[in-house]
Amino acid sequence: MKRRSWALFAGMCIIWGVPYLLIRVAVREFSPAALVFARTAVGGLVLLPFALANGGFGPVLRRWRPLLTFTVIEIGVPWLLLSDAERTLSSSLSGLLVAAVPLVGVAVAFVARSDDAGGGVLRYAGLLLGLVGVIVLLGLDFEHVTARALIEMLLVAIGYAVAPVIMTRRLADLPSYPVIAASLLITAIAYLPYAALHWPAHITAKPAWSVIGLGVVCTALAFVVFFALIADIGPSRATVFTYVNPAVAVLLGVLLLDEPFTAGIAVGFPLILVGSVLAARHGQPATADAAVGEAVVGEAVVGDAVACGDPTPG
């Protein structure tokens, strides 16, 4: 790869590993729903010029049913559940649990009878290995997990695995920026009434900057960099960074939030990582990219990229 491509790749490794840290900080003062509103409003408004420059919202809104379904399953519900779960879960553990999304994607592909189903012995060995990693992670870190947070993370994983199927089947022929910007703005409008009534009375610097970082860096900038990376090296190679994101999430949580580096992380994460790589190796990059999960609809955009062939702006 060229130097520019390596820089973009490194940027994505960091950008989509940061949200877990920022969410953990932001929920100290923002309610989960208010946080979802703030993040989607900021990200959607920043991406608005890109959407208008790439065809506008007309074609997207004409498919409002799959757009709304995708928005609810990919952003509206998962981002709320993830934000609520991180009120009790560490950012490190949240990032690692989302890393298991490709494993759920294998089951979703099988049920949906998509082209991503199948894959041979190695793929299902990876699925089993990844599930063992999740069990080890939760088993050794059980004292850090509540039943409510675990259920929320499970629903997040299901949403992130199902949404790319909707994207590739119903929205993949549309320009990427209008689809993502529309989804973000629709979510922001839906959460606006609640956020207006439950906005924090006092916001300190760290949560405020965390929200801005989530919207500008981890959402808007992430998509700009991601599409540039796809233009340089193609969608399949571009998704490899998703396997680095969980490690970044753990590193940031340990270094900046003084979260413990537990035995569960040390043993479970390598198993989840190897299992996810094997489980995704014969499938569509969209499923592999689901490991990004919460970070910003990343997996759905990869689904768009793969289906369109050339997802770059214009």
Image (cartoon, rainbow, N blue to C red):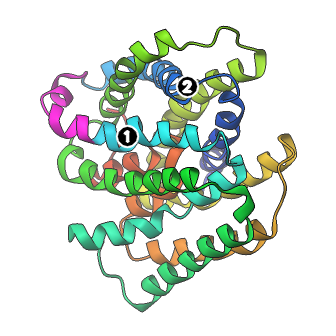
Query: Within the magenta stretch, is there residue 27?
Result: no
Q: Magenta span has 67?
A: yes
Q: Is residue 11 left or right of residue 224?
A: right
Kindly identify which residue carries mark 1. 312
Where residue 205 appears, x then y in whole percent?
Answer: 77, 16
Residue denoted by label 2:
35
Q: Look at the picture and state if 109 lies above or below 250.
A: below
Q: x%, y% of residue 241?
A: 59, 56
Q: Quadrant of residue 64?
A: top left
Image position of 173 (left or right of 116): left
Judging depth in this view, the residue of 88 and 25 nearest the camera is 88
Residue at the farthest bottom position:
121
Label 2 packing within 10 angstroms: few (<14), some (14-19), many (20+): many
Q: Secondary structure at mark 2?
A: helix
The x, y position of residue 255, in whole percent, is: 86, 46
Amino acid under disc 2: Leu
Can the viewer see residue 245? no
Secondary structure category for the residue under label 1: loop
